[in-house]
Amino acid sequence: MARRGSYAKGIAKREEILTAALEVIARNGYGRASVRELAEAVGLSQAGLLHYFSSKEELFAEILRKRDEVDRDTIAAAHADHELGVLDGFVEVVRHNIDVPGLVQLYVRLSAEATEPEHAARPFFDERFRAFREMAAEGIRERQREGGLPAELDPGRVATMLLALADGLQTQWLMDPSIDMAAHIEEFIGILGRPAAP
């Protein structure tokens, strides 16, 4: 029994660490959020904090996983009065990103580092990109069934383009915050839906 209780406490502590880390990084930015500062936010030493994660890279990947979870819940709660389509939900998440520049910075840096095959965050990004492409492709098929997008569009290819557009816009936005990421994505989806010129 003690073992199960210890496991549950470990899970709860990980959640506490991730929730606190989201706040610290959103507030201070990824570049200025040290492991020491994250540890202090939850009353642990650096070694104590890393006891819950295999590496600093895994910690940061888990912070991003937690961010995705919080974003999904926040968007769902904000639109509880009506069902939000997949593509509209994606635009809302992108719009929300302007409120958490530190987390956008973490995402951009860690995703670049995770291109190394052995990087600790590689599995997170592999799974995230796969899941996003599947979800977005289903959203595109939904729009096609409704007549909002042409039937000849390949949903998988368009989903990959949407992911590339969003990730590229995040990098540009970090350098020039006047860029409206959500508006660019909405315009791209709008262009896809326009009939081809005769």
Image (tube, rainbow, N blue to C red):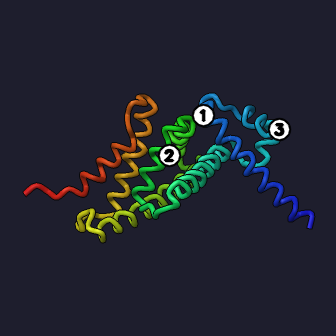
Q: Position of residue 76 (x, y in %)?
A: 53, 58
- The CA span between labels 3 and 2 is 33 Å
Q: Which residue is mark 2?
A: 115
Numbered label attached to residue 43:
3
The residue mark sitting in front, 2 or 1, is: 1
Q: Quadrant of the N terminus?
A: bottom right
Camera-side residue of 53 and 120: 53
Q: Secondary structure at mark 3?
A: loop
Camera-side residue of 112 and 166: 166
Q: Secondary structure at mark 2?
A: loop
Q: Secondary structure at mark 1?
A: loop
Residue 109 in view: no
Q: Which residue is mark 1?
A: 30
Mark sitting earlier along the chain (3/2): 3
Q: Position of residue 170 (x, y in %)?
A: 44, 39
Q: Residue at x 40, y 66 (%)?
A: 138
Q: Quadrant of the C terminus?
A: bottom left
Outermost residue on the left side: it is 198
**Residues packed near mark 1 inside 10 Å, few (<14), some (14 to 19) or many (20 plus):** many
What kind of residue is marked 2?
A: Thr
- The CA span between labels 1 and 3 is 20 Å
